[in-house]
Amino acid sequence: MNRPLTFSLACLWLILTAHSGRAQTYRLSLNAEKLEVPAGPWQVTRVLDLRSDRSELGTVHRGMANETVSADFVQPLTAELTQFFRTQLPAVAGARPVVLRVFTLALTEEMRASAEIAEAELVADFLEPQPDSTFRVLLTVGETTRRSGLEVTKRHATNLALLLQQALRKLAALPAPTIPSETLTRADALAGRGGAANPHFAIQAAGAAPKRGLYRSLQEFQNNAPSEPEFPFAIEHIAHPGKRWVGTDEVQANYLGTDDRHPTRPVNTAGLWGLSDGQELLMVYRNHFYKLMPAADSRNFTFTGPPVFDEKAAANMAGAAAVGGLLGAAIASAANSAAPMDVYELHLASGRVVAAQNTGQTDADGFAKAVDSARVYVYRRADAAKDQPVNFSASGQPTRPLRTRQWAVLTWQDRRHDLKICVQTGSGPEVCRSFVPNFSQPTYLECVVPTDGSAPALRLIPAKEGLFELRRIQRLTAAGK
């Protein structure tokens, strides 16, 4: 498969100043977490990472300035989860092997005026391998969790472990044998087709009208099985004044008056997920009703809701209050109140709501189509093995020499597949490293060549250290040393 990659060997000054001040990727591990899962007939023996973006788990806020930085496991997702399961769920004699396919495992932090919210999401399915090399879809799962506090970054590992625990408990409760929902070929199973990747909820059925009633839970909405309302109700659209609000009517659901004891009154949103009048679908979000529309990918829904919290505007407001007192805060508040409504996306499998500005542009398969690039620098410092030649290659590109005080610049544009980098000295063994690079900051790999003739190594270097080494190599080269 041809992958979008740009390859070049450079001896010129790199324009890297824009990256020099970025914080390091936040790394987390599940080593300290626990899994409380009852014994069951199944055992997860393999994990497939089928996320549309494998470059990171999400973003977090770090430091006094709450700088947004990338977050990821300390090792690739498949290795992290496999190790976690082996440690927490020892093999049981007679258990039937299962493959866990992960389509979404993500985390994020939402800033509010007085707190932070840590959120995590899991969308996955469990497949049972068959003797004829096919796979039975046993179970699809969609999980999400939210925790608030003053500092929530440290809670992400616990949140991710909780989602995995919830999914594994559902698997453990599944009897064996069980009737599969569908059977996949090996090619489809490995490529991420079928199962959780397909629309499979009743509310998504083509041509099916939503049933009238109240949704008390996400599951009732997914199954198009609302509860019966206590009283007749109707949906009312109230237009906002002003041009900037065109197309963003406020939606109100009212119980219809039946007698003096039961006058017309708003439907209480407490304990309610949403409702439908048989034509329109409404979701409760932050105690208000919003009309749901099918998303372009046919898997999810969208709605126009309240403005996304603006961290910079909030900081400006706080500064205005400190400098100008109530008058300054009032001016800043008035400026911020002009923010238009924002588009949100409801992830149907898990119930997670994400501001569209954070979902990225996606194609019909839900994969990112916006072209952006990750930069990877592979360098070799001056070493005692300077006369030892190193052959360097990347993802099928022609092999080229990598000499001391030289570096290679790679540009990678594929968030779903690994970039494979290989080095080799003479006729010795080839050493390779495969990974999806980080797209928010450069990745630096140092090629270390031992003097005893053993195989070279590719060592991952922190961004600041890698930038420093490249600049030093450039200065030495320019000075002719």
Image (tube, rainbow, N blue to C red):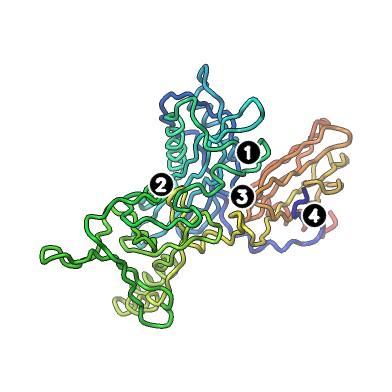
Q: Residue at x 47, y 41 (%)?
A: 141
Q: Name the residue under label 3.
A: 55
- Residue 423 horizontal side relative to residue 17, left or right: right
- Pick whichever of labels 4 and 2 is earlier in the sequence: 4
- Pick whichever of labels 1 and 2 is earlier in the sequence: 2
Looking at the image, is mark 3 or mark 2 nearer the viewer?
2
- What amino acid is found at the position of numbered circle 2 in the picture? Thr
At mark 3, the secondary structure is loop
Q: Is residue 440 visible?
A: no
Q: Can residue 51 be seen in this view?
A: yes
- What amino acid is found at the position of numbered circle 1 in the picture? Ala
Q: Residue furthest left?
A: 260
Across and down, in percent, residue 152 comes to: 41, 49
Q: Mark 1 points at which residue?
A: 189
Q: Tell me the distance, in whole angstroms, between the alpha carbons under discs 1 and 2.
A: 27 Å
Q: Tell me the distance, in whole angstroms, between the alpha carbons under discs 1 and 3.
A: 22 Å
Across and down, in percent, residue 341 comes to: 42, 71
Looking at the image, is mark 1 or mark 4 nearer the viewer?
1
User: Residue 209, relative to residue 178: is it above or below?
Assistant: below
- What amino acid is found at the position of numbered circle 4 in the picture? Phe
- Residue 430 horizontal side relative to residue 219, left or right: right
Q: Residue 7 carries which label?
A: 4
Looking at the image, is mark 4 or mark 2 nearer the viewer?
2
